[in-house]
Amino acid sequence: MADPMKIRAVAKADQVQVKILMAHEEETGLRKGPDGVIVPAHFISNVSVRYADREVLRAQWGPAIAKNPFMQFTFRGAVAGAQLTVTWVDNRGDSRTDQVTVA
Amino acid sequence: MPVKHSPLIMECSRRKLVKAGGLLAALIAAGSEAADLVPPPAPVWNRAAFEAKSVHDALKALGAPVAQEGGDLQLMAPEIAEDGAAVPVVVQSGIAGTKEIHILVDKNPFSLAASFFFPEATEAGVSTRIKMAETSHVVAVAVANGQFYLARKEIKVTIGGCGG
């Protein structure tokens, strides 16, 4: 089970700045373990950020995103106190969803 | 020891099941809502683009036969990255109508690192951290009104991000 994401969403005027830190190994599938056997690929493939029933950011990722992925972006039209929902899905079908209140 | 661990493993798989069910419900709910406003968060993944071994092939898979350099597209990254395992990259597009930003690394085993899709109310810009196998050009591609714009920057990597 993946650890929770760290999400921060701060409203300034009409803008909301979102910072997300996800806990994930991000194995490329190209690296050999200590036993010389290739460590199978395990990485986040899809990310969706939703606010008030609309998607504010969608991403597709390959294995070249750094371990424990970080992402920052800005969107308009949110108010403090509302909920932001972040979901990721990895290439094995595991997923995690976390919510944060816009501050 | 295995006996001691087994309840935890059971708990994990049970929680995973519950989580998967919840996601499915969310996807179904999203699909039934105004689908024309919100692209459903179904995990669509452009396999052809992510498995491309060069920037050229990846761009082709993304549907960009020709990308023009220039436009108000900024790619900010360090000149020298000490650790290729986590290279901070910022891409900002001032091109009106930017709907997508793609980040590619020329000399990575697979060139395409990430694709971001921006709805109307989201600024066409993103910061993230990528892995780089070796010193290479990083390429940012913005898609606006069907046009592809490109910005590139060389980043020197002293320790590759592929691990040993």
Image (cartoon, coloured by chain):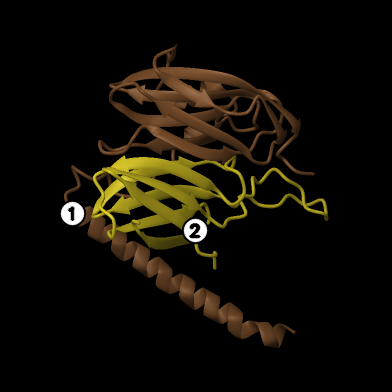
Residue B148, picture quadrant: top left
Colour in which the image shows chain B: brown
Q: Which residue is drawn at 32% across and 42% down?
A: A75
Q: How far separated are the C-alphas under marks 1 and 2?
A: 28 Å
Comparing labels 1 and 2, the label whose residue is closer to the camera? 2
Colour in which the image shows chain A: yellow
> Label 2 sits on what residue type?
Lys
Q: Residue at x 70, y 39 (%)?
A: B161
Residue B117, picture quadrant: top left
Residue labelled with disc 1: B33
Q: Can residue B62 be seen in this view?
A: no
> Label 1 sits on what residue type?
Glu
Secondary-structure class at tag 2: strand
Residue labelled with disc 2: A6
Location of the C terminus of chain B (image quadrant)? top right
Q: Is residue B9 above or below residue B142?
A: below
